[in-house]
Image (tube, coloured by chain):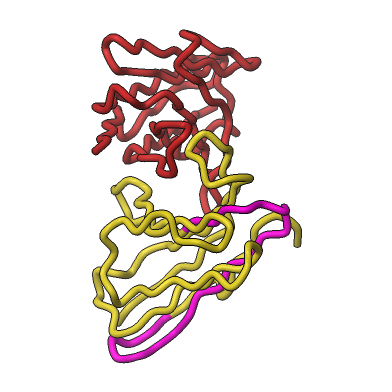
Chain colours: A yellow, B red
Amino acid sequence: ETGVTQTPRHLVMGMTNKKSLKCEQHLGHNAMYWYKQSAKKPLELMFVYNFKEQTENNSVPSRFSPECPNSSHLFLHLHTLQPEDSALYLCASSQEGLAGDEQFFGPGTRLTVL
Amino acid sequence: GENVEQHPSTLSVQEGDSAVIKCTYSDSASNYFPWYKQELGKRPQLIIDIRSNVGEKKDQRIAVTLNKTAKHFSLHITETQPEDSAVYFCAAGDQAGTALIFGKGTTLSVSS
């Protein structure tokens, strides 16, 4: 699949579990993003990485830990989550880490925390 | 920081009618206003955007207008079709900055 891919597509985890979400972009972009999408809420920006460096951390709890080993891959490590963290987690990429660039979204990971 | 309000939250129209979705923003430094469409079960995709040096932009049946003085911008869809049914998100940001702030979304339903 071209564009932005995310795995897994669905994840169910308990509050004591540790899991990771993976995002990969095949567009040659330099910036990658994590968003949280909950019902009836705006898309919430969580993290921005530009050339592998984190440029934005939108007051996200430490139970979410991002990792960007290179410009094509982005991970979100999850640890001791709460039920209210259940949401669709979307990854996106853009050419540069600028708000004026078009962002290309992945299909998302539907996370359920029991 | 920036705050984006989007109205209405749901909109139902008949096929062929026009649909208008409105957004307001708070930060006068914002100069980039994209609109994303998210079909059911699919990823958001950019459909049109406008930058603060223009007041209106049109692409076939879709148009966006911007009023910087009043800090609001709107999406206009004419001759709606069932495939226009989706959730539409507006966003605002400083195009030289790193963060886009999104509205809550509008669920548009077009019935035939």
* Residue A75 percent location from the top left of the image: 52, 72
To which quarter of the image does residue A28 belong? bottom right
Magenta-span inclusion, residue B88: no
* Residue A25 percent location from the top left of the image: 66, 60
Q: Is residue B38 above or below residue A19?
A: above
Residue at x 33% of width, y 87% of height: A14
Give the extent of the magenta segment. A12-33
Residue at x 32% of width, y 54% of height: A39
Residue extending farthest bottom: A16
Screen quadrant of the C terminus of chain A: bottom left
Residue extending farthest right: A1
To which quarter of the image does residue A32 belong? bottom right
Residue situated in front as seen by the camera: B83 or A84? A84
Residue at x 42% of width, y 36% of height: B89
Q: How many marks?
A: 0
Residue A82 as seen in the image, left or right of residue B96:
left
